[in-house]
Amino acid sequence: MSDHTSLTPYLVVNDAAAAIEFYIAAFDAEVVTRHLAPHSDRIMHAHLKINSGDLMLSDDFSSDMGGKSETPISLGGSSVTIALEVKDAYAAWDKAIAAGATVTIPLADQFWGERYGLLKDPFGHKWSIGQSIARPSREEIDKAAAEAFQG
């Protein structure tokens, strides 16, 4: 039994080795562990560190177990966004784009006090990049949200 609590995303991707290389290039990921499936070059489990947070991932083994693929690419997308809070959103954004991420929502200063944008990685997973730039009051956020969501 563990003496701490955590929440760790676990991604399934079409090419875990390529995903690891992308996460290293895009988000400065550090590989903690990487285990290959027996008699295979497919990754059955990898543990990465990004911004001091944990990320786990593996290749898609669903067809080996009689199921259908559930990667974002096979499903046509994902409803989950992995949020990265960074010190320099512009630098993190540019690095991720250079590594192959595509823009979903452009990086911009948002009414809730973040410099924020949304990217999709080459494996179909969504990532937000955020940097705190202001601390608006609850009333200021509510007013700006009402204006932003008019119509």
Image (spheres, rainbow, N blue to C red):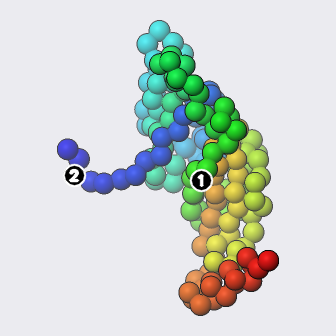
Question: Residue placed at 66% from the left, 31% from the top?
Answer: 74
Q: CA distance from mark 2 to mark 1?
A: 28 Å
- Marker disc for residue 81: 1
Residue furthest front as drawn: 151
Q: Of helix, strand and loop, which one carries label 2?
A: loop
Neighbourhood count class around disc 1 (C-alpha, 10 Å): few under 14, some 14–19, many 20 upward:
few
Q: Measured from the top left, where is residue 140 in percent x and y?
A: 63, 89
Neighbourhood count class around disc 2 (C-alpha, 10 Å): few under 14, some 14–19, many 20 upward:
few
Residue 9 visible at all = yes
Question: Residue placed at 53% from the left, 39% from the top?
Answer: 11
Q: Measured from the top left, where is residue 16 in percent x and y?
A: 57, 29
Q: Of helix, strand and loop, which one carries label 1?
A: strand
Which amino acid lies under the numbered mark 1 shown in the image of this protein? Thr
- Marker disc for residue 140: none
Residue 22 visible at all = no
Q: Measured from the top left, where is residue 138 in percent x and y?
A: 56, 87
Q: To which quarter of the image does residue 136 belong?
A: bottom right
Closest to the observer: 9 or 34?
9
Q: Measured from the top left, where is residue 116 in percent x and y?
A: 68, 66
- Marker disc for residue 3: 2
Q: Is residue 63 left or right of residue 7?
A: right
Q: Is residue 6 left or right of residue 134?
A: left
Image height check: is 14 above or below 8?
Answer: above
Question: Residue placed at 74% from the left, 83% from the top?
Answer: 147
Which amino acid lies under the numbered mark 2 shown in the image of this protein? Asp
Q: Nearer the viewer, mark 2 or mark 1?
A: 1
Question: Residue placed at 64% from the left, 57% from the top?
Answer: 128
The quarter of the picture where the N terminus appears is: top left
The quarter of the picture where the C terminus appears is: bottom right
Q: Earlier in the sequence, mark 2 or mark 1?
A: 2
